[in-house]
Amino acid sequence: MLLIQRVFRLYRWPLALVVLLSISSGLLSVGVIAFVNERMINSADMAGGAIWQFCVLLALMLAFASGAQICLTTLGHRFVYGLRREMVKRLLDTDVQTVERLGHGRLFASLSSDIRNVTLAFVHLPELIYGGVLTLASFAYLAWLSSAMFVATAVWMVFTLALGWRLLLRLRRHLALLREAEDGLYRQYQEILDGTKELALNRDRARHIYDGDFDASARSYRDHITLADRYHGLASNWANIMVLGTIGLAFYLAKGLGWADPAVAATYAMTILFMRTPLVSAVAAVPAQLAGNVALSKVESLGLAQARPGFDMPGRSGVASWRTLELRDVSYRYPAEDDDPGFDVGPLNVTLRRGETVFVIGGNGSGKSSLARLLSGIYTSQSGGIFLDGRGLTAADRPGYRRLFSAVFTDFHLFSQLIGPDGREAAAAPLHRWLDALQMREKARIADGRLLNTKVSQGQRKRLALLLSLLEERDILLLDEWAADQDPLYRRVFYRELLPALKESGITVVVISHDDRYFDMADRLLKMEGGQLTDLVDSQRARAGRDALGEIDGTQHPT
């Protein structure tokens, strides 16, 4: 099983210790039965020391059984802790394109449901190991009591296990389908939570979501978990009944056919009754193991980056002194999906000079945001390359290159922690200076290097996001439609006061904007249209400045 293999690979010797303790516990359990049979039932004169020997056996069995369970539980939670850290680290190291392709719903399902199922698998693993070891030890004792009766009992148990295995295969199939339905549920949860306000206004849309995609996913989950529980119940009851049936078989073989004396049959019955509960518990633990294996398979199917220690924290020594940044024949293609034919961006050719303030204009879907992602190295170009001072960047240079940039994207996330250059805590002087420039000193509540109030208006959230970017003190600042949510008064402050201050600080600023009245604040004006980039000069720039809405193409495509 995938789960056991992975644990064995990571914790070989601790797991070997657990198995040794479990085997010892199983053997001691059978030893207790044998002691009771030989010294307490069949012995005509039970010596006074027998009771103390019996107590010693019980104490040893308690020590080994408890030790095995404690060790396995500790090992299991350590493994789950490591798995959770590994998965989040792999997610952090995975390229943005892959994360966007997978979707947040699928990733949330793995981070929550799959990790939970792996945890439950470990919770029930001691029952499976102990029940399995005790069953094997009990069978060995039964074979020692009567080989002929054991052969008949073994045939009976093989038949029991064969049918039980078929039930468990059905169970595993429905657990896999159940996990697929769970992905759909998480996608619907995310859509409902993200669209709460819109759904409050449009109850028809709420009804369609509720009775449509959500109901389909919920119904699929219900059907598969019902069938999974049904096969689980059948497998557990089948094992229970057939184990009890073994007692009747033993007495029939002993008394009816004369294969053994009644005392052997009684010992057979006592041994089977003793192993019945652990065996049924082991069978009951199988679904959790199957679900855990399905969960691990689901995690691996995401195609996240391989786990590697640490973070890419290269210095900027190789790029810190850059003067020109050039895109040469850089391109990117959004693949076709369903009825969407896809979209091509590029080839893009442009040169940025250090300290420039560059505006990027263009219609919705023209590729402006894609340009920002390609420029910052978030998206990997499918052709061409990026050059700093004429030197082409390699894959090894990419982490250091990204450290040139800070950004506020249209779909930004506002973090609470204030971080300065190179990951250090933000200094008080620049913090207060930028709070004043952003007119957020009275609004922002800060303590222990964190923002305490992030539930403010969207325009103020964008100002706080810009604050976080400025505190990083990167060379290049990307602002994607940043001014769109600002009030007219502060929008003017942004363009007429803040941008010149940034330029004076030596920061290269790339602003994606539709604010044609402020185009004069740009050193250069670039235009995206249909995935192609044009550097507007002279009369082209003048026309764009007079009437941006009339000049910018409005091709519709989500980029």
Image (spheres, rainbow, N blue to C red):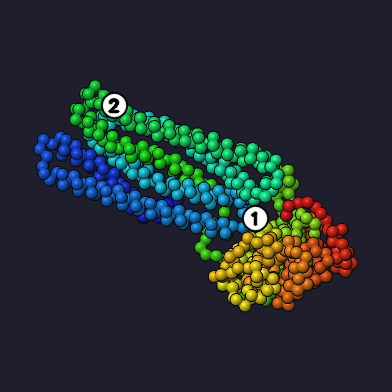
| Residue identified by numbered label 1 | 97
**x, y percentage for residue 451?**
59, 66
The image's mark for residue 316 is none
Q: CA distance from mark 1 to mark 2?
A: 63 Å
Res. 433 visible in picture: yes
Q: Is residue 500 left or right of residue 297?
A: right
Mark 1 is surrounded, within 10 Å at the Cα level, by few (under 14), some (14 to 19) or many (20 or more) other residues, namely few
**x, y percentage for residue 146?**
23, 32
Contact between marks 1 and 2 (CB within 8 A): the answer is no
Nearer-the-camera pick, 45 or 490? 490
| Residue identified by numbered label 2 | 248
Q: Residue at x 25, y 29 (%)?
A: 148
Q: Residue at x 44, y 47 (%)?
A: 120
Q: Amino acid at mark 1?
A: Gln
Of badges 1 and 2, nearer the viewer stands: 2
Which quadrant of the rendered structure holds the N terminus? Answer: top left
Q: Is residue 548 left or right of residue 486?
A: right
Mark before the other along the chain sequence, 1 or 2: 1
Nearer-the-camera pick, 116 or 464? 464
Res. 21 visible in picture: no
Q: Secondary structure at mark 2?
A: helix
Which quadrant of the rendered structure holds the C terminus? Answer: bottom right
Q: Amino acid at mark 2?
A: Gly
Q: Quadrant location of residue 499?
A: bottom right
Q: Quadrant location of residue 416?
A: bottom right
Q: Residue at x 70, y 46 (%)?
A: 201
Q: Is residue 303 above or below residue 256?
A: below
Q: Residue at x 50, y 58 (%)?
A: 85
**x, y percentage for residue 10?**
43, 55
Nearer-the-camera pick, 247 or 154? 247
Nearer-the-camera pick, 113 or 347? 113
